Each structure stands twice: as structure tokens, then as C-alpha cells.
Image: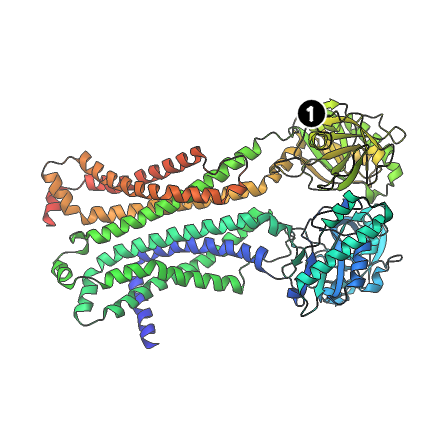
Amino acid sequence: MATLVTDLRYGLRMLAKNPGFTAVAVLTLALGIGANTAVFTLVNTLMLRSLPIEKPQQLYFFGEDNSGSSYDGPFPTGSLNEFSYHIYKELRERNTAFFEDLAAFSSTQVVLRVAGVKTGDLPRRVEGALVTGNYFRLLGVNAVLGRTLVPEDDREDDPRAVAVVSYHYWVQNLGRDPNAVGNALEIDRIPFTVVGVAPPEFFGVKLTTDPPNFWIPLGWQPQAKAEPSRLKNLDTYWLDVFGRLRPGVNPRQAQATITGQVQQMMTARAGSQLNPEEKQRIQQAYVQFIPGARGLSSLRERFSERLQVLSLLVVLVLVIACLNAANLLLARAASRQREIAVRLAVGAGRGRLTRQLLTESVLLAGLGGLAGLVLAFWGTALLSNLVFGGSATLPFSLSPDARVLGFTLLVSLLTGIAFGLAPALRSARVDLNSSLKEGGRSAGTAAPRIGRLASGKLLVSAQVMVSLGLLVVAGLFVRSLRNLMHQNLGFSPEHVLVCRLDIAAAGYKPDQLPAFYERLLGRVRALPGVRSAAVASRSVLGHSIHTSNISIQGVPSNPNGEIDTERKTASDAYFETDGMVLLAGRAITRDDTRDSPPVAVVDQTFAERYFAHQNPLGRHFSFGSPFSPPGMEIVGVVADAKYDSLSDTKAPPMTFVPVAQDGGYADDLELRVAGDPKGAGQDVRRAVADIDRNIMVTSVHPLRELVDESAHDSRLIAQLSSFFGVLALLLAAIGLYGVMAHSVLRRTGEIGVRMALGARRADILGLVLRESLLVVAIGVVLGLPASLSLGRLVSTQLFDLSPNDPATFTIATLLLLLAAALAGYIPAQRAAKVDPMVALRYE
């Protein structure tokens, strides 16, 4: 221990004696370690952190997170992610041997309109979750104030009007008032009693950027979602189910049993009408158990591959930083050659010297780790803002925790050993005789050691190799983003404004909606500059999926695949407003009312999948099974469009139903205007207020902004990979400059001799530049195969682009050569200015 303390003190003194070297090395390492710590913090939060619940390892979800989706139909197939209320109850009753309990919640959060009962404030839109009464008990989550929901609160026919609020809502909206528990809040015009406040770290069982602020009993679904009750509907699959597995139970055995039970329920549901095709569909349905310790997370699925790529990129940046530090240590070792030789001459062991030099390397890495940790706090905040848009409602902390601190310590230690071991071993093997003979000369004028210089150049070539890979990956993501943004969207986003209305909160019933939409569209279409306007259940890129199975007149059910469609409701002028192309037939018109025959417009994928080589116009289908005459007549076919995400490679079958015939809420008002759509926002708000001041316009966005938002993830990975690519290029250029500057300094005598024998300045300039470019060329030759492998690694995240894209590889190589020319030019110019007489005196 005493020896270690001595080594540390001596190492600190040596680093303090060379502040310039220490600052450059620490900053280089801080960039690499800080970037790794920031990305690992995000990985730790999204991928590794457990739910703040009791014994999370016992929790299992029935299916994956499929947020925003529901399914209508008697026979879902494949992996079941949502369940009907009937199936949930049956499973809970049958599986007490496997599970301590089962609970359920709505797969989609609900928008609640919350106001104080006595204050008279306008209602605020708040995200809420519909949960069964045993939800909190199963999770082992207790309230910090009051109590949580209990099974008695969730009676199927008579649920209590009670709610648990999040800690965030209690702090931000109820002022931490301990008397808030027991008081009433008006939720969707119904007085609800606040019975408890959830713990500050609890955000539910789904990791999302917009967690629920209220948990209310599942029985309030009809009022909360302003739709018919789903509790009695056997064919609506809308619940996420999870359970706490009993200790000692085999999850695979329980999963197989649950799958068999669900298939039995579907078979019993069909009764004697079950045909062979439907039987086969039921047999293909299964339940997949998902370990629930880390909760369900669409964010995890969304960012998983990109986080893996980012982790690889920052590791490569750290490798470059280590190579740079190793180069600095090699150069420093050359200047300490006589010191090391003297210490060996007076009896110091080579192992002792190696340990001392390695201690200095680890000290450097430790200082770099501390500086990197400071950078990581700043980098994590920046990364959070880039990834999540600076959301103030994030339920999870992105600040480094104990696991992150341990990661940083380990990386710092391994980094110090990695970049310090080779220079320490090389320095300890110094030749005493030659080193002491050179003692009369300064370190800067000692005869060049070919081995040391070659090692430094090889390290730079390695940096170039890694930098090329980073630049290629960055280039691929940038070009992929360009392809994503310039593709055919199937609609025209320019000059379109999308306004989100909260019609249900104003108390409108379904039978009042057609007349309201007629008044609303008439008023909005009269606004100056408005070319067309329409309402729809959700705009394109609205991220809402409502899937229904369908039955086509005269077409048997398909045993090998779903016969289903996504559905939207829309008014007349919808396709014109969004700029969608009508391929055949007609669009929805004002004549498509509740009194006229039911009609539908389908997209190209629908027509090709279900009416291949046939004319779909005039054919009839109905939602559900079996076919219910007369069904809906297909009156038009529109071109495919990007309904959910820009990166979708294939449009889903889509059905557009007239809003007057559907009877549901169409909350998106869309306008095509002559000028800037943002300028029409205030006019729309005034027009809606003229019709009914109780209707809130909750958001106003140009459709172009929604398109840009949809490309957020692709833009993020392009920006971050470009940043790391430029950082790698900068570090490689600094490394090349350092090696070439050191080489020129050590070869001053040789350069003087060359110039005395008649070499021109241009010859010396060319000599050093050729040497620089040779170092880079070696790195490029070695880096191309590695870059091809990296390109294939990220190929699944590219849009309409080959991972071997020639243009990307060419541009990346040219950038490296240009950086090499700039980095080598300064030492080359310095060499060309050497005075031969001064240089010869060194000899």
C-alpha cells in the first residue's frame, strides 16, 4: 500500500510538471469517457432499470406492448397482445395455481378532462389509465397519502367514482396539499374523490414519455372513452393483462396452459358455427409471456436498435481517444528516455518502472473519468432533450446513478490500462548504453528511434481506420434520412393545418355529431384563404391504430392470414384536403349520410390484397364475422399513404368510412390554406369558439411539422452519428498532427542535411506530406473492410439505401484525406522552413 501511495504521489507530480500534456490527454479521454457515460445512462434508464415495485422479477405480461391498438373481431390470431374483459376474468379465475393474481389495464391511455369542483376553473386535459381494482395490490405499490384503488372500487356494474393521482400531479396541480385526499375533482363532468397519491417514483407499468396522472377504475371506460361499454363486448380486445407468478412455477408451463385456455374460450365463443378455417385461426393464436421486471415499453422497442448503434459508436470514439492518449504517452516517453535510463542504472527494476508508468496512465484515465463524468451530466441533459424533446413529464430520472458511476469507474480503469500498458512496457525496455550516450543532447534532438515513430504512426493508422467506420455510418444515416424525407408520402403536407378538438368534453352525444360537423365545416370553409376543410378520426401520421376484422361478401375467411383492416372516419373533402390521390371510383361526399346506403373508400393495399386482379368497386364487406348484409359498398380506391410512420415500407389495408355513417368522434379538423398554415390557427380557434365556446382546440400543427416529427428518430441517429463521426475525425487529425510534428522535431538534423545537399523547400514539404498521407492511406485500406461490416450491421435501420452505398464511402474517404492533408501541412510547412545551418549544429 505504501508503494502504491508513493507511485500515486510521484505520478501526480509528473503530471503537474507537464500541464499542457496532462490537459490534452485528460480532455481527449474526457470526451471519450463522457460520451460513453451519457449513452450508458440512457441505456440504463430505458433498458436495464427495474420497475419501482415489490419483487419485480415475479411479474409477467401477457404479450408485448402494442400501445395505441385494439382489435375488434371474434378470432384474433398469432401472438395475442390485448384481451377482452371476458377473457381476462376467465383467466384470473382459472389460474390461481400459477399466479398470485392477474390484473388488467386499458392498452391505450385515456384523456381525462379534470377541473376543481368548487374553483370553477376550465377543465385541463390529463392522461389517465383505466385499471382493475387489484392493480396496485398486485404490484405491491402503496400510496404516500391516502390509499390506492381496491377491488371494491371496480365493481363491474357500479364502479366507484374514485381516483389515485400521480405524485407529479399532486405537486404541480394540487400544491402538495395533504387535504387533497378526500376532496373531489370533476373528471369528465363527474365528481371523483381523490383517495390517494402514488409514490413519486411510480409511473405505472409502461415506460412512456407521457405517463398517466390519474388511475381510475376500469368500469368507467364508457364515460372516459366516450364510447359504448367494452366490458360486455366479447369481441373487443383492448386490455393489457399481467400477473405475479407464484414462486417455483415454470413460466413456460404456465404460458402453454394459458394459451390452451384462450383457444378453448375462443372455440366456445364460436359454438357450433365454427368452420375449419376459423378453427385453424384459433389454433394459431398463442400467448407469449414477457418478463415484467422492467415493465412494458414501446420506448424500449423504439430505441433498442438505435441505442445499440449509439453504444457501438461511442465505444469506437473511446478507442480513438485511447489511441490518441497512447500516442501522447509514447511521445512523452521519448522525452523521458534519459530519466528512465538513469533510474534503471541506479538499480530500479524494470517491473517497478512499468508499474510506475502504468500508475501514471491510470491516473490520467481517472482524471479523464472525473472530467468525463462532468461532461456526462451535461451530455445526458442534451441527449434527453434530443431524444425526448425536453418533456417535463418524464417519469424516470436520466441522471447518472450508482450503476452509471460504477460503469464510469470501470471504463476509466480499463481505459488507463489499455492505452498505458504498451508505452509503459516499451519505456521500461530502454537500452541503457545508447540512452545514456545521448544524454548530452536534448530529447528533442536525440537520434530518431524508428520503432517508436513506427508505433506512433501505426496508432494513427488505427485511428484513421476507426474514424473511417464512424464517418461511413454517419454518412449512411444522413443519406437514409434524406431518402426518408424525400419519399412519396401518398399525401401533400404543404399548406395543411391539423387542429385537434376535444368534442366529447363539450358534452356532444354521437347522434348530435353529424349536425355539428356540418356547422363546423361550413364555418371553417368560409374563412379567408381556406381552400378545403375536412374532419377525420385521426390525421395521417396520427399514431393511432384501430384494427377490425372484416368479412367480404362471397369470399371465404382466410385460414393463413388475417382478413382485417385499419379504419378511419372522414368527412367529404378529406382526400382533397390531404392531397391524397383517388385512383378509382369516387371519394366520400356530403350525400353519404346516416340515411344513405353504407359506403367505404379503401386504399390500394386493401384492393390488391383482397380483390387481386378484380375490380373492388361495387363489392360489399362488413366489419366483424360473419358477413352481415348488406354491408358497406366500396365506392372508391385511393393511393397508399404513410398513415402511421414515414419508415413504414408497406401501407396497411385501410378503410375510410363517412363520419356521418360511423357515429364516432372525429376530433381532427384539417384545412388546406393558400398561404402559411400557421397563420390560420387563430382564425380556426375563433371559428370553433363562435360555434361552441365549450369545445377546446387542444393543439394546432401544420402537417409538415407532423411529418418532421415522424422523422425524429431517424434525424436523431443521423445527428448523433454525425457528431461522433466529426469528433473521431478531429481526434484522428490531432493524433496525426502530433505524430508528424514529433517526427519533424526529431528529424531536424536529417532535414538540415537534405537541405544542405540541395533539397528544396518544396521537396521537404512533399516528403512530410507524403509520409502523412501514407499513414492515412494505410488506415483507409484497413478501414474499408471494417466499414463494410459496420454498414451491414446498421442496414436494418436504413431507409431505401444500400449499406455499401458507393457515394457514402467515397465522401468519407475524401474527408479523411482532406483532414490528413490539413493535419500534415502544418508540420510539413514547419519542416520546409528549417534553417540548414541551425539544423546542422544539432549534429
Q: Secondary structure at mark 1?
A: loop
Q: From the viewer's perspective, is 178 left or right of 428?
A: right
- Choose between 714 and 546: the one closer to the eye: 546
How many numbered circles does the render carry?
1
In which quadrant is the N terminus drawn? bottom left
In the figure, residue 604 lies in which quadrant?
Answer: top right
Question: Which residue: 20% across, 64% down?
Answer: 339
- Name, please, the residue furthest toward the bottom: 2
Question: Which residue: 79% across, 57% down?
Answer: 88
Coloring scheme used? rainbow
- Choose between 586 and 554: the one closer to the eye: 554
Does residue 722 appear anywhere in the picture? no
Q: From the viewer's perspective, is 72 left or right of 763?
A: right
* Residue occupied by mark 1: 581
The relative height of residue 337 versus residue 227 in the rendered view (above or below) is below
- Choose between 274 and 546: the one closer to the eye: 274
Q: Residue 375: horizontal and vertical position, in percent?
A: 46, 55
Q: Residue 697: horizontal and vertical position, in percent?
A: 75, 39
Q: From the viewer's perspective, is 755 left or right of 485?
A: left
Question: Which residue: 21% across, 39% down?
Answer: 767
Type of amino acid under label 1 = Val
In the figure, residue 678 lies in which quadrant?
Answer: top right
Q: Residue 805: horizontal and vertical position, in percent?
A: 45, 35
How many other residues sit within 10 Å of disc 1, few (<14), some (14-19) or many (≥20)?
some
Q: Residue 668: horizontal and vertical position, in percent?
A: 75, 36
The relative height of residue 142 versus residue 655 in the rendered view (above or below) is below
Does residue 298 appear anywhere in the picture? yes
